[in-house]
Amino acid sequence: MNRPLRYGMVGGGADAFIGAVHRHAMALDHRYVLSAGALSSTPEKAKRSAAALGLPDERGYESWEAMLERELARPEGERIELVSIVTPNHVHFPVAKAFAEAGFHVVSDKPLVHTSAQARELEAIVRERGIVFAVTYNYTGYPLVKEMRRLVREARLGALRKVVVGYHQGWLATKLEDHGAKQAEWRTDPARSGAAGAIGDIGSHAENLVATVTGLELEAVCADLTTFVPGRRLDDDGNMLLRFRGGAKGVLMASQVEIGHENDLVLQVYGETGSLRWHQENPNELWYAPLDEPVQLLRRANPYLGPEAAAVTRIPSGHPEGYLEAFANVYDEIASAIHRHAAGEGTSGDYPSVSDGARGVRFIETTVASAASEAKWTPFPSSLASA
């Protein structure tokens, strides 16, 4: 169960942010070894990036198609066992489909793909091939997110009434995409990012966090998407009301133009007998408010937490754990699932699955459709009209 898994990476070459994050997270528990890569869509850059990471020349591929073909030609005990896809969004589907059909395990960054039709196709392939397919909603790896989920499941909050989730950033408050900012360029380009901007990029994280912690199923969305920066082609701010099956309600906000915010993800869950509040920028603390009792501050790595939080805690209390450790926790669960698969024990595990990714794509599509429809909004009478 502890043998390092051989993986190949698509994307994540020189100057790429998220590829390095994935590699650092995968290295943290010594459960993976980078064995191959097609690290850029530019062949020269791909080869250069592979050499910089210490890959032998024959395992630094000029394209993902070449990596798939040549890795399949290798003996089973030498080829990669999974592929990690860390490209802009438009590349996710063709790479994931090709490697999944070939029987490789797949880890894809989010959002999974551009359309729900593509997502359904991937779900069908995963069922047919029986592989592990994960989507890196990395915030689910935090110990106190798992603790929130436990408290909700154990009905410590009673029946859920309301969820408020906000993901606040300010880095796109100006038109960075016109000034050579690589991350801004592709994230604001519909051809590469998809149908949504901020809602797809960070709103999908907010949706997944709500679903993971509460288990609530969305019934309807009332969305208002805005593009505040002139000339930008995708939304940079989103606000919506949520209706869940069973009667709970929600509010979701996702913005990348809120100046002063860095990576400010906050989840609040309210039930009949208590509430929870967690803040990603201070992830080692969870506020729990039982009805008619003092508000409690729960901290990571303490014995009063449940077994799921304890299992993904790495260091003693008082020593902060953060973003990379949470990311590594997701990859650790994926590695365990792949080893169980090799032992004939199925593909289940506590990691975001292809179905979670598919639900995220449906969320993005539903939000965009809702924002484009004015039928649900009732105009507010002006003061002149009421005079």
Image (cartoon, grey):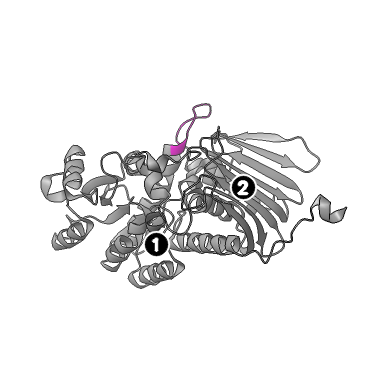
Q: Tell me the kind of residue under disc 2.
A: Val
Name the residue at the top extreme. 318
Foreground of the two, 247 or 386: 386
Residue 294 among those drawn in magenta: no
The residue at the point 29 percent across, 38 percent down is: 15
8 vs 28, nearest the viewer:
8
**Residue 308 position within the rendered picture, expressed as x and y whole percent measured from the top left:** 52, 46
Q: Chief secondary structure of the magenta span?
A: loop
Q: Which three-letter amino acid code belongs to the residue tagged 1?
A: Thr
Q: Which residue is mark 2?
A: 165
Q: Is residue 151 left or right of residue 112?
A: right
- Residue visible at 49% across and 27% down in the picture: 319
- Give percent across and percent down for residue 374: 65, 64
Relative to residue 362, is residue 33 depicted above or below?
above
Point out residue 59 in the picture as x, y percentages from the top left corner. 15, 50
- Judging from the image, what secondary structure is the residue with disc 2 in? strand
Residue situated furthest right in the rendering: 387
Q: Label 1 near label 2: C-beta < 8 Å?
A: no
Specify which label sits upstream in the sequence, 2 or 1: 2
Q: Left or right: 41 with respect to 313?
A: left
How packed mark 2 is, by other alpha carbons closer than 10 Å (few <14, some 14-19, many 20 or more), is: many
Give the numbered dot on residue 187.
none
Q: Which residues are magenta?
A: 314-323
Q: Quadrant of residue 278?
A: top right
* Quarter occupied by residue 371: bottom right
* Mark whose residue sits in front, 2 or 1: 2
The answer to whether 120 appears left or right of 66 in the picture is right
Residue marked by disc 1: 347
Mark 1: secondary structure: loop
Label 1: few (<14), some (14–19) or many (≥20) C-alpha neighbours in 10 Å? some
